[in-house]
Image: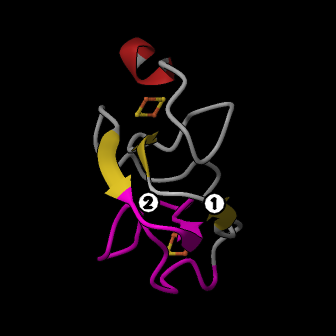
Amino acid sequence: MDQPEIDRKSPYVLDLAHGTYWWCACGRSQTKPFCDGAHKNTAFTPVKFEITQPAQVALCGCKRTRNPPYCDGTHKQL
Ligand code: FES
Ligand code: FES
């Protein structure tokens, strides 16, 4: 698998609490947009990120962002 699976062509806009999160980079997780371990045996690994205070974030759903885990608008070109 050279490319991650496209989950959806729009971001996940979520209100996240303070904490540590793992964004799914492979597109295979059943708990998207977060990693559930399904990337095993693929070339992909999850992206760890920290939320230091409650915040609304737009996490990439298409898995093609150049600024993971955040949406950078690349989904509009898919
Ligand atoms: Fe996709 Fe872990 S399940 S990176
Ligand atoms: Fe992937 Fe926007 S959803 S870049």
Q: Which mark is residue 8?
A: none
Q: Camera-side residue: 66 or 2?
A: 66
Q: Camera-side residue: 62 or 33?
A: 33
Q: Camera-side residue: 54 or 37?
A: 54
Q: Is ligand 1 closer than 8 angstroms to the Cβ of mark 1?
A: no
Residue 26: give x, y in percent of width and height: 53, 62
* Residue drawn at (34%, 65%) of the image: 32
* Residue drawn at (45%, 84%) of the image: 36
Mark 2 or 1, which is nearer the eye?
A: 1
Q: Is residue 19 above or below residue 73?
A: below
Q: Is residue 29 above or below residue 64?
A: below
Residue 50: give x, y in percent of width and height: 66, 63
Q: Is ligand 1 closer than 8 angstroms to the Cβ of mark 2?
A: yes
Q: Camera-side residue: 68 or 13?
A: 13
Q: Secondary structure at mark 2?
A: loop
User: Label 2 vs label 1: CA separation?
Assistant: 25 Å
Q: Is residue 44 above or below residue 53?
A: below
Figure quadrant of the C terminus: top left
Residue 47: give x, y in percent of width and height: 67, 62
| Region in magenta | 16-41
Q: Amino acid at mark 2?
A: Gly
Residue underneath mark 1 = 52
Magenta stretch secondary structure, dominant = loop
Q: Judge whether residue 36 is colored magenta.
A: yes
Residue 52 placement: quadrant? bottom right
Residue underneath mark 2 = 27
